[in-house]
């Protein structure tokens, strides 16, 4: 049985059971017996059941005993009251069913209002979560951009350091070539001078030239030291 649409047979069976047990046959009693069901559907089926199964009360027989002829007026009044009792009972039952339907409608409206309030709260929560997700997405994009810029900066620093290392290697090679060339030139000049002016003059010139070469070497060493300090500074910034 579906929760909101009980069949006529189910309503009729529940109503007959209540009637056979001497219990009042109302919408609420039938719904309790079924365990569930729409009050409107139960009321419609119950009205059909009453039409088919609850006959109107039989009027009292009109056999008036001879001794009661004098009381005919009282009997007729009582007969009229008894004849209308069935209709009054049906009217009272219908009013009771309508009251039950009204109470069920109020309960359904209260449930609807509660569900609407829950839906509004859920919608507000969804909107709040959407705002938080959007804010986190913006923060994530900014963090990625900062990380990308940092990587680019480190790559540039590494390229600068590599360039300085190559320059330092080139300077060392130039220094070694210069020293070797100067030594060769000095040796050649020394030999020529020793042949021309003698060993003493050649020795003095060699000493002077050697002093100049030492000065040049010290200058190159100073340049190398400065380059090394610059490279160390780049590495420190990169770290």
Image: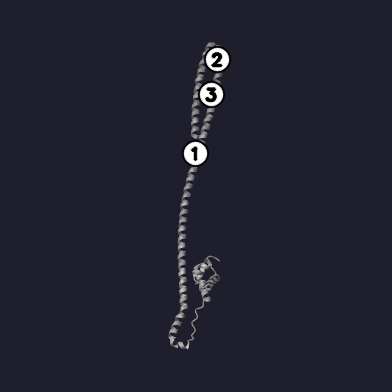
Please tell me whether residue 66 is drawn above or below residue 99 in the rendered image: below
**Residue carrying label 2:** 190
Q: Foreground residue, 9 or 66?
A: 66
Element class at badge 2: helix
**Residue carrying label 1:** 150
Residue 197 visible in the picture: no
Quadrant containing the N terminus is bottom right
Give the colouring mode of the picture.
one colour
Q: Foreground residue, 51 or 72?
A: 72
Q: Foreground residue, 128 or 147?
A: 128
Evaluate if marks 1 and 3 touch, with contact meaning CB atoms under 8 Å apart: no
Element class at badge 3: helix
Q: Is residue 136 left or right of residue 184?
A: left
Viewer-side label of 2, 1: 1
Residue 160, percent from left and from top: 51, 33
Sequence order check, earlier mark of 2 and 3: 3
Q: What's the mark number on residue 188? A: none
- Bin the neighbour count of mark 1 within 10 Å (Cα to Cα): few under 14, some 14-19, many 20 and up: few
Viewer-side label of 1, 3: 1
**Residue carrying label 3:** 175
At horizontal 49% and vertical 39% (from top left) the residue drawn is 150
Please tell me whether residue 148 is drawn above or below residue 16 in the rendered image: above
At horizontal 55% and vertical 15% (from top left) the residue drawn is 190
Viewer-side label of 2, 3: 3
């Amino acid at each position: 049985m579906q929760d909101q649409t009980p069949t006529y047979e189910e309503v009729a069976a529940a109503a007959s059971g209540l009637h056979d047990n001497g219990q009042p046959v109302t919408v609420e009693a039938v719904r309790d017996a079924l365990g569930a069901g729409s009050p409107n559907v139960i009321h419609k089926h119950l009205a059909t059941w009453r039409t088919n199964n609850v006959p109107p009360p039989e009027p009292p027989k009109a056999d008036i005993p001879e001794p009661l002829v004098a009381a005919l007026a009282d009997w007729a009044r009582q007969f009229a009251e008894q004849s209308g009792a069935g209709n009054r009972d049906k009217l009272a039952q219908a009013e009771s069913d309508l009251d039950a339907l009204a109470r069920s409608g109020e309960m359904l409206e209260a449930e609807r209002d509660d569900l609407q309030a829950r839906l509004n709260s859920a919608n507000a929560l969804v909107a709040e979560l959407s705002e938080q997700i959007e804010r986190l997405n913006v923060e994530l994009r900014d963090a990625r951009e900062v990380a990308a810029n940092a990587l680019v900066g480190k790559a540039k620093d590494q390229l600068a350091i590599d360039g300085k290392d190559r320059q330092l290697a080139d300077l060392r090679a130039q220094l070694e070539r210069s020293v070797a060339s100067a030594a060769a030139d000095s040796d050649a000049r020394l030999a020529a001078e020793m042949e021309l002016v003698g060993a003493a003059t050649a020795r003095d010139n060699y000493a002077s030239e050697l002093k100049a070469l030492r000065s040049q070497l010290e200058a190159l060493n100073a340049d190398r030291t400065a380059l090394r300090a610059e490279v160390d500074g780049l590495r420190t910034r990169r770290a």
